[in-house]
């Protein structure tokens, strides 16, 4: 079984150091985000754990500090389901940080019952896409000031099943948890594509990542019999540490070896689905997102 597993989950490693660099990882209190933060801290980076649940974030920071020699780890509260919280987080970052080299938009919710954010957006679209869209908007000046810098957006293979429902982005007319999730993951890919065009001249590169099928808390809303299948094929599902490999790959790989705006999986460039390469849809989603958030990108 181990030999079969190695075919599906190839090992990857790098000894690149990140001393003097600063990274923000959203949703860093558990799963892929926590493993990403731990790896970056081990490379010498100053890592900001941006989390909604401060108790879990503080515990994650303690775990990282025990595992990593001389870590530089900071905890900051961030609720991506509330634009006021996002604004407060960004203000604290500008007041406390002189630079930001990596913004890793990792947090997410998946296949959950219908709910809305503090601003009335459907929860999965609101957190997975709009929350990170707004956060990136607010932190862009610091990313530009710190260039060369990178934004990494975590998507999913689920983006291949997604479609952007412009006539019902918040699922008010018709809601299905899987449809809402796949829409949000496609939105991550399209956001990456459009943002990359707008920031490349500033020295801010952007990548989207499919971490693979990973055993994390995000799957807690998955019902049986799908949960039974996950259990059955558990040996072929990535651990959170393995799920973080491609994110870290997009952090440490030299810029010239990465495609700006590209989609990555298993530590290699991996073309997104056709819908994820639609520039017209990406631009339309950009405009819709700005309208919903009442913002205007310069």
Image (cartoon, rainbow, N blue to C red):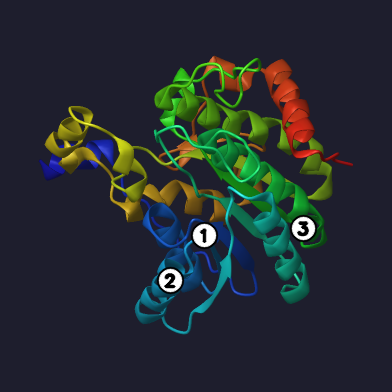
- Residue at the far right: name it: 298
Give the Cα separation between the discs numbered 3 and 1. Answer: 28 Å
Q: Residues within 10 Å of mark 1 (few under 14, many from 20)?
A: many
Quarter assignment of residue 87: bottom right
Q: Is residue 103 above or below residue 280?
A: below
In the picture, which quadrant includes the C terminus?
top right
Q: Earlier in the sequence, mark 3 or mark 1?
A: 1
Q: Nearer the viewer, residue 77 or 18?
A: 77
Q: Nearer the viewer, residue 29 or 119?
A: 119
Q: Residues within 10 Å of mark 2 (few under 14, many from 20)?
A: few
Q: Which mark is residue 52?
A: 1
Q: Which mark is residue 55?
A: 2
In the picture, which quadrant includes the N terminus?
top left
Find residue 254 and report its horizontal and vertical position in percent: 61, 52
Q: Residues within 10 Å of mark 3 (few under 14, many from 20)?
A: some
Q: Could you tell me which residue is drawn at 22 percent across and 29 percent down?
A: 226
Callout 3 touching callout 1 (CB < 8 Å): no
Q: Which mark is residue 147?
A: 3
Q: Could you tell me which residue is drawn at 67 percent across and 63 percent down?
A: 89
Q: Earlier in the sequence, mark 3 or mark 2?
A: 2
């Amino acid at each position: 079984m181990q030999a079969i597993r190695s075919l599906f989950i190839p090992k990857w490693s790098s000894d690149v150091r990140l001393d003097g660099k600063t990274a923000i990882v959203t949703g860093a209190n558990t799963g892929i985000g926590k493993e990403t933060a731990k790896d970056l801290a081990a490379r010498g980076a100053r890592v900001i754990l941006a989390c909604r649940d401060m108790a879990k974030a503080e515990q994650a920071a303690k775990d990282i500090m025990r595992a990593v020699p001389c870590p530089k780890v900071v905890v900051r509260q961030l609720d991506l389901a509330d634009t006021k919280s996002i604004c407060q987080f960004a203000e604290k970052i500008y007041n406390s940080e002189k630079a930001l080299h990596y913004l890793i938009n990792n947090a997410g919710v998946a296949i959950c019952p219908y709910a809305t954010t503090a601003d009335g957006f459907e929860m999965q679209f609101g957190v997975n896409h709009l929350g990170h869209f707004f956060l990136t908007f607010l932190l862009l000046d610091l990313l530009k000031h710190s260039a060369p810098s990178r934004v990494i957006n975590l998507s999913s293979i689920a983006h291949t099943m997604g479609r952007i429902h412009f006539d019902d982005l918040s699922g008010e007319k018709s809601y299905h948890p899987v449809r809402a999730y796949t829409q949000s993951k496609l939105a991550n890919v399209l956001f990456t594509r459009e943002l990359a065009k707008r920031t490349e001249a500033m020295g801010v590169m952007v990548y989207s990542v499919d971490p693979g099928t990973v055993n994390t808390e995000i799957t807690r809303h998955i019902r049986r019999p799908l949960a039974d299948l996950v259990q059955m094929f558990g040996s072929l599902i990535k651990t959170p540490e393995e799920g973080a490999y491609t994110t870290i790959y997009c952090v440490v790989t030299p810029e010239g070896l990465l495609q700006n705006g590209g989609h990555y999986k298993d530590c290699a460039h991996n073309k997104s689905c056709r819908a994820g390469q639609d520039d017209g849809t990406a631009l339309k989603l950009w405009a819709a997102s700005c309208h919903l958030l009442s913002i205007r990108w310069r």
